[in-house]
Amino acid sequence: MATRLKHSTVHNHKRNNYVHTTSSRLNTRDFINIGVFTALMFVIVFAFGMLGLVPAAMYAGFLLSILVNGIVFALFTARTPKMGALTIMLIMIEILFFVTGHWVGGIAIATVFGLLADLVITKGPKNVKVRVPLAYALFILPIYVSPWMPLFINQDAYMSAIAEQMGAEYAAKMAQVVTPPILLGFFVVMLIVGWLAGLLGTRVARKHFERAGLV
């Protein structure tokens, strides 16, 4: 019985800390994982972002992408729990956003928050139910905050650019749902949903991906 109890304790400890064992350097397999998961996360953000064609549905699209990518994030950190992995991924995502017309300053913000997320994953709390959600909340900030920074800097210029790209009618509808107070409220909701999505991701990754031998 003592042996069985010891085995159960060790097993539970491993389950609660499945992304905490790290090696120091990224290898070829890690870079492949970074590329694959970067593409996957970007596609998910972009796909749900298409709901933004209807301004009133835009925020729902953002939150749905955060929920889905919480699972992707948890699996990635389980497969590649190494310093620098999240920073590289986040920079690559922001570069893709820049290529598609978003604010170039997002790359600098991604570097800072990517490093913070990396530190949480590699040096943070041992409990995966704290570590992964916290890292994910930091990780998503540049993705969903950076695109709106030009609006906070110069709202009139931002809306004028929207009108040129999408038309005056679309810009008028956008102006009704995209204001600094509304965005600030959304950022708070985003962090809460990000934390919950991180928790969901840890459960899915542990119950399904580990059982399947994928992590």
Image: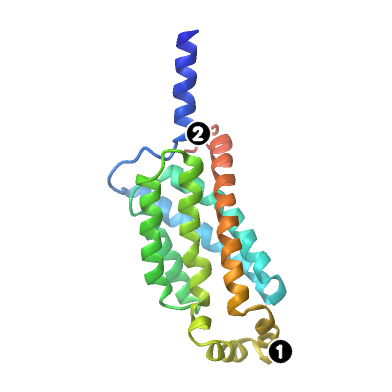
Model colouring: rainbow
Residue that carries the numbered disc 2 in the rendered image? 213
- Residue 131 location, quadrant: top left
Q: Nearer the viewer, residue 169 or 6?
A: 6
Give the mark count.
2
**Which residue shows up at 37% across the image and 53% down it?**
118
The answer, for residue 54, to whether it is visible in the render is: no
Report helix, strand or loop for mark 1. helix
| In-image side of 193 versus 135 (left or right) | right
| In-image side of 109 versus 201 (left or right) | left
Amino acid type, mark 1: Glu
Report helix, strand or loop for mark 2. loop
Amino acid type, mark 2: Gly
The answer to whether residue 44 is above or below residue 198 is: below
| In-image side of 111 versus 3 (left or right) | left
**Which residue shows up at 66% across the image and 90% down it?**
167
The answer to whether residue 59 is above or below residue 67 is: below
- Residue 14 location, quadrant: top left
Q: Earlier in the sequence, mark 2 or mark 1?
A: 1
Q: Nearer the viewer, residue 66 or 177?
A: 177
**Cα separation between marks 2 and 1:** 51 Å
Residue 151: x %, y % from top left:
53, 82
Residue 6: x %, y % from top left:
45, 16
- Residue 169: give its label: 1
